[in-house]
Amino acid sequence: MTSQLAGFKGTRGTLLVGIGGCSSSGKSTIAKLAVQVLEDAVLVHQDDFYRHDDEVPFDEEYQIGNWDVPEALDMAQFERELDHIRATGRPAAKLVHNGNIDDVGKFGISEEYLEELRRRYRGRISQPVVLVDGFMLYHDDKVAARFDCRLLVRAPYATMKARRASRGGYKTLDSFWQDPPFYFDKFVYKSYAATHARLFRNCDVEDRLVAPDVQEIYNGDEAQITCVLEQVLDAIAAAQC
């Protein structure tokens, strides 16, 4: 993040945009692409607020740490960071240790296309933007309320499970984590469903999103990443003061 901040002109008029969703919905990838288009933007990853390995809640039944509950994060520090951004328009430069993001180069998006988007949105998005991607942005009203624009990236259960299974693992503060075979069902998706149910019709996270202040961004495998990216940029443009 330090290199991102070097040219960032954040002010108190900075737009704070949340890009939330279940693990493997594609939220981090989309956020990373959006930052490549926006001329005055920086990206903060909620994963940078994970606790140390020995502080992560331990599941007695499965005898492993549960990385997918709010308690696995230092939410107090995360909320302070959001407040700092709202007060100053800039994130803290010390948050630099997350590397668990897919290489966006695999999508084959040309620099010519990205430059076309920069020209298109240059006049539509004039405020500095801080994008925050994370899996626990909207589980708590007091956290969600800090964002000027709230986007929720969605994909079908089977799609997210397959994407998660294709990952080799995750770097933590102290070690390297690899999912046990049951982890997506018993921890990742179970926690997402429990913490986000209130946003959906019938409290079913596979049903329609009904939260009036959260906008859906669909990112199933059949969705074109360029269309998803433009939908995010349109939402940011519409959220400006």
Image (cartoon, rainbow, N blue to C red):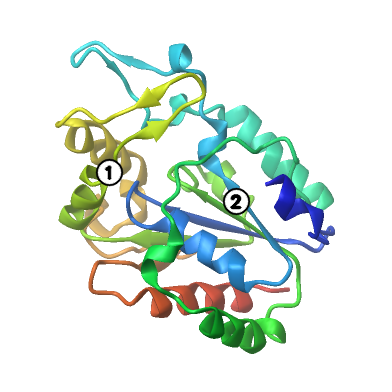
Q: Is residue 107 left or right of residue 82?
A: left
Relative image position of residue 113 (x, y in whole percent): 52, 84
Helix, strand or loop at mark 2: loop
Q: Amino acid at mark 2?
A: Ala
Q: Height in image: 106 above or below 18? A: below
Q: Nearer the viewer, residue 212 or 3?
A: 3
Relative image position of residue 200 (x, y in whole percent): 31, 57
Q: Is residue 24 left or right of residue 39?
A: left
Helix, strand or loop at mark 1: helix
Q: Residues within 10 Å of mark 2 (few under 14, many from 20)?
A: few
Q: Nearer the viewer, residue 189 or 230?
A: 230
Camera-nearest label, 1 or 2: 1
Q: Residues within 10 Å of mark 1 (few under 14, many from 20)?
A: some
Relative image position of residue 199 (x, y in whole percent): 36, 54
Dividing the picture into quadrants, the one containing residue 94 is top right
Q: Residue at x 26, y 66 (%)?
A: 220
Dividing the picture into quadrants, the one containing residue 183 is top left
Real-space Cα separation, disc 1 to disc 2, in angstroms: 20 Å
Q: Height in image: 22 above or below 207? A: above
Location of the C terminus (image quadrant)? bottom right
**Residue under pointer 1:** 193
Q: Height in image: 194 above or below 207? A: above
Q: Nearer the viewer, residue 7 or 238?
A: 7
Ranked by sequence position, the earlier of labels 1 and 2 is 2
Q: Nearer the viewer, residue 93 or 59?
A: 93
The label on residue 145 is 2
The label on residue 113 is none
Q: Height in image: 175 above or below 195? A: above
Relative image position of residue 100 (x, y in whole percent): 45, 42
